[in-house]
Image (spheres, helix red, strand yellow):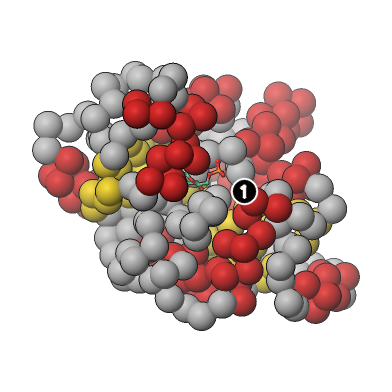
């Protein structure tokens, strides 16, 4: 995988936006890509940059379809913290992407197991995802694939760890309001994307980033599955890179990129 270490989170946001913009403008208009969208704070600066380019530079997303990584189980449709609402608020409502082209698991379905299977099928029908944006949990999760997730798992219901519930409590009125269950794309589902683009910033993510990039390929760190993917890019700021042993080599590689070598 390529590890891109940049001074600040804002720099990371610009590079992540560059990769997404390149995918969006690559194909002819009739063949716009499917994007894999992540929620959480990690991609927010990249999303703001995309919105800026849309408004100021005419970057168009017309015809692009977006597929979310995951969703809470049990929040009513339209709940402000459901990931469908979050991605609308933070990205798609401000772009020229039709609401009907933004997909996510149906966390309000009476049977979440059925909703998970339906979502996996919808992804298969609309795939492959051209670029899958990913954050990383402090425990190494991607999507909501908590440690122990099968490396070839598909979309399914997962139970959140208490750490993840605590981490996400900031978005809810009371900590006990954080749902216990979620529907998440599996690690095998995520791995079907053509390009995995993980971004993280801040010291709180440094241990998880080091485990994902330089630790063993293991279900104990779900993000380590990026090591198994033919095209994975990790875009991180200096603080998130602090525990990488090969950081100097990654910087050297970046400095000596060939002129037209994309991420
Ligand atoms: C959340 C999401 C993930 C996200 C991760 C990190 O629970 N399900 O998709 O990448 O945890 O979140 P943040 O970017 O806010 O640190």
- On screen, residue 240 versus residue 187, left or right, reads right
Q: Is residue 185 left or right of residue 248?
A: left
Front-most of residues 192 and 70: 70
Q: Which quadrant is the C terminus positioned in?
A: bottom right
* x and y, in percent, of residue 82 in the image: 38, 28
* Quarter that holds the N terminus: bottom right
* Residue 103 visible in the shown view: yes
Answer with the quarter of the image where residue 177 lies: top left
Crowd around label 1: few <14 · some 14–19 · many ≥20 (10 Å)? many
Residue 243 percent across, percent down from the top left: 71, 67
Residue 257 visible? The answer is no
Query: Which quadrant of the figure has residue 187?
Result: bottom left
Residue visible at 43% across and 45% down in the picture: 164
Asked which secondary structure carries label 1, the reply is helix
Q: How many marks?
A: 1
Above or below, comparing residue 20 to residue 103 in the picture: below
User: Toward the viewer: 84 or 217?
Assistant: 217
Circle 1 is placed at which residue position?
20
Picture residue at 44% right of the left edge, 47% below the top: 163
Residue at image point 79% right, 57% down: 238
């Amino acid at each position: 995988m390529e590890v891109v270490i940049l001074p600040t989170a804002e720099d990371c946001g610009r590079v992540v936006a560059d990769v997404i913009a390149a995918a969006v403008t690559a194909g002819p208009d009739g063949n716009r890509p499917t994007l894999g969208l992540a929620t959480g704070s990690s991609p927010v600066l990249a999303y703001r940059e995309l919105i800026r380019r849309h408004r100021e530079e005419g970057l168009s997303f017309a015809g692009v379809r977006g597929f979310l990584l995951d969703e809470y189980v049990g929040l009513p449709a339209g709940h402000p913290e459901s990931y469908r609402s979050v991605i609308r608020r933070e990205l798609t409502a401000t772009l020229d992407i039709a609401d009907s082209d933004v997909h996510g698991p149906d966390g309000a379905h009476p049977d979440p197991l059925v909703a998970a299977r339906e979502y996996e099928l919808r992804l298969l029908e609309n795939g492959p995802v051209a670029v899958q944006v990913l954050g990383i949990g402090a425990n190494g999760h991607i999507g909501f694939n908590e440690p122990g997730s099968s490396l070839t798992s598909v979309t399914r219901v997962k139970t959140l760890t208490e750490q993840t519930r605590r981490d996400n409590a900031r978005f809810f009125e009371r900590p006990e309001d954080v749902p216990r269950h979620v529907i998440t794309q599996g690690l095998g589902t995520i791995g079907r994307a053509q390009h995995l683009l993980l971004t993280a910033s801040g010291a709180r993510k440094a241990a998880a980033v080091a485990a994902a990039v330089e630790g063993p390929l293991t279900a104990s760190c779900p993000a380590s599955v990026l090591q198994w993917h033919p095209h994975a890019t990790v875009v991180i700021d200096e603080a998130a890179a602090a525990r990488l042993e090969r950081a100097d080599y990654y910087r050297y590689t970046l400095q000596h990129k060939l002129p037209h070598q994309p991420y």
